[in-house]
Image: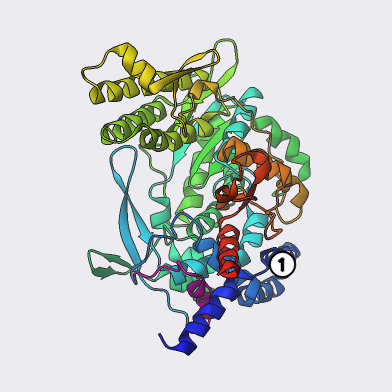
Amino acid sequence: MRSSDQTTALSMKTAWHQINWAKAQKHVRHIQFKIMKAYETGNRKRARALQRLLARSFSAKVLAVRKVTSNDGKSTPGVDGQLWNMPEKKWQAVQQLNRGKYRAKPLRRVEIPKANGKTRPLGIPVMYDRAMQVLWGQALEPIAERAADLRSYGFRRYRSAHDAIENLWNSHCKGTAYVLDADIKGCFDNISHQWLIKHIPMDKQILRQWLNCGVIIAGKYYPTTKGTPQGGPISPMLANLTLDGLEQATAKAAHLTCHGYTQQSHWGHYQRSGLHVIRYADDFIVTAKRAEYLTEAIGGIKQFLAERGLELNEQKTSLGHIDQGYQFLGFHLRRYADQKVIIKPTADALKSVKTKVSQIVREMIARTQDDLILGLRPVTLGWCQYYQTVCSQRAFEKLDNHVFKRLWWWAQRRHKRKSARWIKNRYWRVEGKRKWNFVTGQTRLPQCEHIPIIRVKNLRIKANIFIDETYFKQRSQDLAQLRMSRREAQLLSKQNGYCPMCKGVLQVDDQTNLHHIQPKLTGGRNDIGNLMLVHANCHQSYHATHYARRT
């Protein structure tokens, strides 16, 4: 490498690490708020102009690049094989994110295994296309949030599957006994391109590039004539925008009225019907107090979907009663004889995690106890965190029992000539009143039955993330208990929801790291007083610049 090239690479690396992230976030939020207000007042021309302004801004570009280089797919390349894993590559990408002459590259098709043994096709865009999708997604999000159905919970900031389940529980407790469990056939793969081009309020040239980019399967190019770029960051938002308005269509088909759609004088009639559409992405449940409301609504739902190139899966769509029970998002809901509505993990969900535990233990028969604990912890804790908001205590005990049996099998296979007492003393320790703790000097495997059950606070469904910032900041800290470790949640609360390094907001879905204030190499302890919860990118930048100063 020539000297000038080395200097340029060094300057780009320094420039990336010196970005003021808090200022960038503030600037983007300011423009997003203006976009939402323009759309709200019907000024579509101004909204489009502000979208273009945001997409051209340096702040939005750096945040887009940071997003795609810090999420779970950062190490998965597209058809060009490129990754932005160096600061200089990230900075260079920021300079290249432009609308002019933009041409999206084909998707790389991969097959993702599903829980039922089948596979789901996923299209992986190249890094540049991912960044463009995040960039324009920032410009589209204010409109998507303003137009969203009130009870849409999937792939929206500060909303989760737990909110959808809590909404269903509240609805059933108020007497909505009838349920339409609906399934859309291949939603992401079949959405009409014509409908998207006509109705999605964003730059049509950019949108056409994403929709018509094609896909590479086994080295051969195939055109894409329908569906959204599943696997790309923009796909969930496009799907949500496609299905927004479903509750209105359902209410009209049932000859009811819905707040904001028809006369206010009929609002009480609509409320008494209990007719609600609770949706998580393309999965949705329709509830009502009378079965005929749902029977009438099915026709309206079919028409609504047909206009968008979609249809119901008749074999998986059913009309039922809460007393019979039904499943949604991995939860089983049922009203029992005492009129209590109980929510539990489904039997299939428990079976699936047990199978995963058994597989990990078998694969690690020759590994150390530390390795086995580190392999099992994210599986058992992740499963329990997802289900700790409902009546899961019995399921947690069953999972603990299964884990113990598999661990005992693992220990016996390793020491076939040793006694049970020797094995117990070798791998399990007594701590307080707990006699069977699978721990080493460095790591431990938590017992699921000791994970507390936490009720989800009711979401204010009319709250808007661009208006009610204080409310959602607090809600982010509440959701952290479900998605972060206990230590991370404590740090987030202690830091008042901010990253101490960049002073920017720490969102629940952000990639984060634990930073030691006093390094462990110099005697720093691993306790909460010596730790900070920071953005993964901020952590990387800190150590890069700190190392540069020392050298």
- Where residue 150 sits: x, y (%)? 65, 45
- 33 is higher (above) or lower (below) than 252: below
Residue 192 x, y percent position in the rendering = 43, 61
Q: Going 61% across and 74% down the picture, which residue do you hit? A: 55
Above or below, 212 against 68 in this view is below
Residue under the image location 36 percent in, 56 percent down: 122
200 left or right of 530? left
Magenta span contains residue 549: no
Depth order, front residue of 228/249: 228
- Looking at the image, residue 9 lies above or below residue 264: below
Q: Please, which residue is most extreme toward the front here?
A: 522
Can residue 136 be seen here? The reply is no
In this picture, residue 297 sits left or right of residue 129: right
Count every numbered label the image shows and give the total.
1
The quadrant in which residue 525 appears is top right
The residue shown at (68%, 56%) is 146
Q: How is the image coloured?
A: rainbow
Q: In which quarter of the image is the C terminus?
A: bottom right
Q: Which amino acid does label 1 sit on?
A: Lys
Q: What element carries label 1?
A: helix
Where the N terminus falls, by quadrant? Answer: bottom left
Residue 236 drawn at (x, y percent): 50, 55
Q: Which of 447 and 190 is in front in this view?
A: 447
Range covered by the magenta-colored residues: 81-100
- Counting from the top left corner in percent of width and height, residue 258 is at 68, 43
| Residue designated by label 1 | 23
Residue 93 highlighted magenta (yes or no) = yes
Q: Is residue 470 visible?
A: yes
Tell which of 310 and 208 is nearer to you.
208
In which quarter of the view is residue 33 placed? bottom right
Are there few (<14), some (14-19), or many (20+) residues within 10 Å of tag 1? some
